[in-house]
Image (spheres, helix red, strand yellow):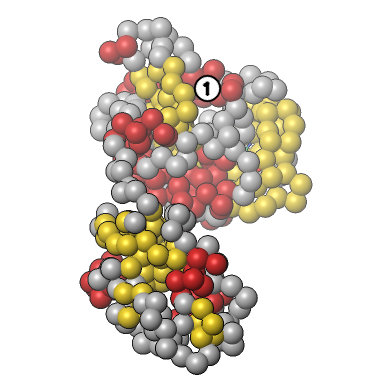
Amino acid sequence: MKKYLTLENGDVFVGEACGDLGAEIDGELVFTTSMTGYQETLTDPSYKDQIISFTYPLIGNYGISLETSQSDTVQAAAVIVKEMTDQVFHYQSVISLDAFLKQSKVPAISGIDTRQLTKIIRRYGTMKASLTNQPVTKQTEEDRQASIIKSATLSAGDAKNAEHVVVVDFGVKDNIVKSLQRPGIDVTVVTPESTFEDIANLHPTGILLSNGPGDPTDYSDFLPVIQKLQDNFPLFGICLGHQLLALANGAKTYKMTFGHRGINHPVKNVITGDIYITSQNHGYAVDVDSVDDTPLEVTALEVNDKTCEGLRYPGRPVFSVQYHPEAAPGPHDANKLFDKFIDMMHVNGGVH
Ligand SMILES: NC(=O)CC[C@H](N)C(=O)O
């Protein structure tokens, strides 16, 4: 039975299945150069969930003994060998390596040039890999687009002239999407698993980073995407989206003592002097002082505790607010921020 080893860089190795024949797994691919000690290695908890490739070409020739394991089971996710032998010669051996792997439900692949594999890992660094029973079919561009799009609404306007807002959905409230939907505006909601290229391929004229739960520092994977988005498109961040814009530009966030949750939080726009009564719901905030060392500028403060309520990127159509301009519930004072964002798209959209 064939088994396929597919590396993160796209390389594919085909070998013979051994160990647990049916099992398929993903894991971090590492190599070990030990010439002996495969039983200790495979049962060492530090190798948990890793795919271990043995550079030594013959593995299994002294079997498995009752005294050698370093924990009560095989910890590695999978095993890659050049040759796994059933010809066992050792007085303490009770079972073959292949049988031991089968018992432990761990898949393995033999017939792999593990020295060539090692050279690849040394060039690219440790990478993810998968062991499968069928070749991994490459995801096409269309599959990828379909998997990141959660919903799309076409405006009633002239499609050719429509602005196209891509909303990155970290947990978006319906009323944010509704506040954008109007004639002449197409809205596509995508998951935060989207890459910059995924989003750019949708040809947006503006990006909205949504609200969402939890600690903004947990979303660090998405920060490089925001860095590229703000270089290329008009961008508007709301609540969590505001915090992520701050983090992507090097500012800091912190957990507030008891947060802001209510529908009458006064916010002062420090540039225009305007005051809005706003709807709020957040437990983290952007550290105002940390914004000094970034390209961003603070545009608004909460009147009572002077926490950061707004940011902008001078010279770019990029801004964010900590409060909720979509209300639901709450006052509509700040609703015109959606118009401001749409106006920015009219001026700047399509320039990329
Ligand atoms: N409404 C939100 O987006 C909340 C943002 C973030 N989870 C916070 O509590 O600060």
Q: Is mark 1 on a helix, strand or loop?
A: helix
- What residue is rendered at 70% in x and 50% in y? 256
State whether label 1 is within 8 Å of ligand 1. Answer: no
Residue type, label 1: Val
Q: Nearer the viewer, residue 21 or 114?
A: 21
Q: Position of residue 277 (x, y in %)?
A: 68, 26
Horizontally, is 299 left or right of 195 in the view? right
Characterize the local packing of mark 1: few (<14), some (14-19) or many (20 or more) Cα atoms within 10 angstroms: some
Q: Is residue 291 visible?
A: no
Q: Ligand 1 sits in which quadrant? A: top right
Compared to residue 108, the image places residue 10 above or below, namely above
Residue position for label 1: 177
Q: Where is residue 177 in the image (x, y as percent from the top left)?
A: 52, 22
Q: Position of residue 83 (x, y in %)?
A: 31, 74
Q: Which of 25 and 227 is in front in this view?
A: 25
Q: Nearer the viewer, residue 19 or 299?
A: 19
- What residue is rendered at 38% in x and 53% in y? 132
Q: Nearer the viewer, residue 22 or 178?
A: 22
Q: Position of residue 116 (x, y in %)?
A: 23, 72
Quarter of the picture containing the C terminus is top left
Q: Can residue 337 be seen in this view?
A: yes
Quarter of the picture containing the N terminus is bottom left
Horizontally, is 317 left or right of 212 in the view? left
- What residue is rendered at 55% in x and 44% in y? 243
Q: In which quarter of the image is residue 316?
A: top left
- What residue is rendered at 46% in x and 76% in y? 97
Horizontally, is 324 left or right of 298 in the view? right
